[in-house]
Image (tube, rainbow, N blue to C red):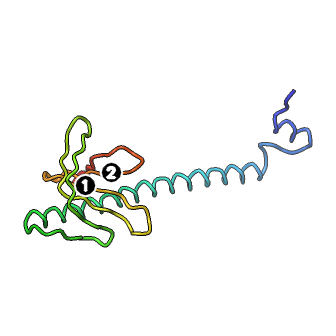
């Protein structure tokens, strides 16, 4: 027969659910949950900002490439190159013009591609390719 932990504590004379210890533990639990939520939302925001910076860098590179015919890196994290692969995402084929390795050379680098129409694709090794869309 199993006895719940609070029953064992009550038998030992502890005041479970009463007094300053309960208030302290409840406050500590609420603070921990709030901190976890804050860190989770911050990580999501930073990930989106990271992708938006990549999107802007390759958009500028495409504009420069279409007007001058030269390939230029517009960001210190970018390495832009000619990239002519085709991807089918949600039954639509995207023909890429430029590709970009995004990230610091020692860290994980992501492949970002752009089509002639300016559609940016985020390509990862572990996840399926996705179209990067940002509202203005």
The residue at the point 68 percent across, 49 percent down is 26
The residue at the point 32 percent across, 51 percent down is 123
Give me the C-alpha separation between circle 1 and circle 2. 7 Å
Q: Considering depth in this image, is 64 or 25 the residue closer to the camera? A: 64
The kind of secondary structure element at disc 2 is: strand
Residue 117 is situated, as x and y percent measured from the top left of the image, at 13, 51
Q: Considering depth in this image, is 75 or 49 the residue closer to the camera? A: 75
- Decide: is 117 above or below 80: above
The residue at the point 22 percent across, 57 percent down is 83
Name of the residue lying farthest toward the top: 1
User: Disc 1 vs disc 2: Cβ atoms closer than 8 Å?
Assistant: yes
The residue at the point 56 percent across, 53 percent down is 36
Q: Considering depth in this image, is 118 or 34 the residue closer to the camera? A: 118
Which mark, by number, is residue 123? Answer: 2
Please identify the quarter of the rendering in which residue 7 is found: top right
Q: Residues within 10 Å of mark 2 (few under 14, many from 20)?
A: some
Please identify the quarter of the rendering in which residue 63 is found: bottom left
Name of the residue lying farthest toward the left: 67
Residue 101 is situated, as x and y percent measured from the top left of the image, at 31, 62
Q: Is residue 20 left or right of residue 9?
A: left
The kind of secondary structure element at disc 1 is: strand
Going from the N terminus, do you reach mark 1 or mark 2 first?
A: 1
Residue named by callout 1 = 113
Q: Is residue 38 left or right of residue 88?
A: right
Name of the residue lying farthest toward the right: 12
């Amino acid at each position: 027969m199993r006895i719940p932990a609070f029953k064992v504590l009550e038998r030992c004379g502890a005041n479970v659910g009463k007094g300053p210890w309960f208030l302290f533990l409840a406050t500590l639990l609420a603070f921990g949950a709030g901190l976890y939520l804050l860190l989770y939302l911050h990580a999501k925001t930073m990930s989106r900002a990271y992708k938006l910076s990549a999107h802007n860098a390759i958009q500028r590179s495409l504009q420069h490439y279409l007007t001058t015919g030269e390939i230029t890196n517009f960001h210190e994290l970018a390495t832009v190159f000619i990239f002519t692969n085709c991807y089918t995402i949600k039954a639509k084929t995207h023909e890429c013009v430029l590709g970009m390795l995004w990230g610091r050379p020692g860290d994980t680098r992501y492949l970002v591609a752009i089509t002639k129409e300016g559609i940016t694709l985020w390509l990862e090794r572990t996840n399926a390719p996705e179209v990067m869309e940002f509202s203005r």
